[in-house]
Image: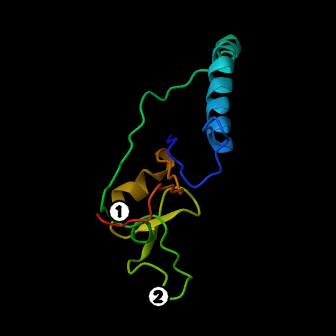
Amino acid sequence: MTFSDQKTFRHCDGLSRRSFLQVGGLALGGLTLPDILRAEAAAGVSNPHKAVIMIYLTGGPPHQDTVDLKPEAPADIRGEFQPISTNLPGVHVSEHLPRIARRMDRITTIRTLVGSTGGHSS
């Protein structure tokens, strides 16, 4: 999370509305998390997930060539590679990712991007 948003209106104390909402959301999450965990434990809910693997690729392959191929889009928009089916119905990945295609039911693709600069220097 970043608090360096210079484009928003700041009040006289220097706190923007966005920053206030971000901090408030964190506080609310921190206050309610113990109750949520206690309720899950009482209900017998277990979470077998033990790790998150985050792949951060600076200058890596673009989304339109890996997981967002848009095969129905015009040629100047879609990626140059062909989509292949995965073991998750309706989800496709690049033809160059066959091992990921076999394990897609265990993978989460986060299709969001938020940047604080507009530069593409990498």
Q: Is residue 30 left or right of residue 122?
A: right
| Whole-percent x, y for residue 108 in the image | 50, 48
User: Depth check: 107 or 68 in front?
Assistant: 68
Instruction: Write down the residue under mark 2.
Output: 76
Mark 2: few/some/many CA within 10 Å (<14, 14-19, 20+): few
**Numbered disc in front, either 2 or 1:** 2
Q: Quadrant of the C terminus?
A: bottom left
Q: Which mark is residue 67?
A: none
User: Depth check: 109 or 85 in front?
Assistant: 109
Mark 2 belongs to which amino acid?
A: Asp
| Whole-percent x, y for residue 4 in the image | 50, 45
Asked if labels 1 and 2 touch by Cβ distance under 8 angstroms, the answer is no
Mark 1 belongs to which amino acid?
A: Leu
Q: Is residue 14 left or right of residue 53?
A: right
- Residue occupying image coordinates x 57% and y 55%: 7
32 up-or-down from 70: above or below? above
User: Which of marks 1 and 2 precedes in the sequence?
Assistant: 2
68 up-or-down from 75: above or below? above
| Whole-percent x, y for residue 48 in the image | 50, 26
As helix, strand or loop, the secondary structure at mark 1 comes to loop
Q: What's the CA distance linking mark 2 and mark 1?
A: 22 Å
Instruction: Write down the residue under mark 1.
Output: 97
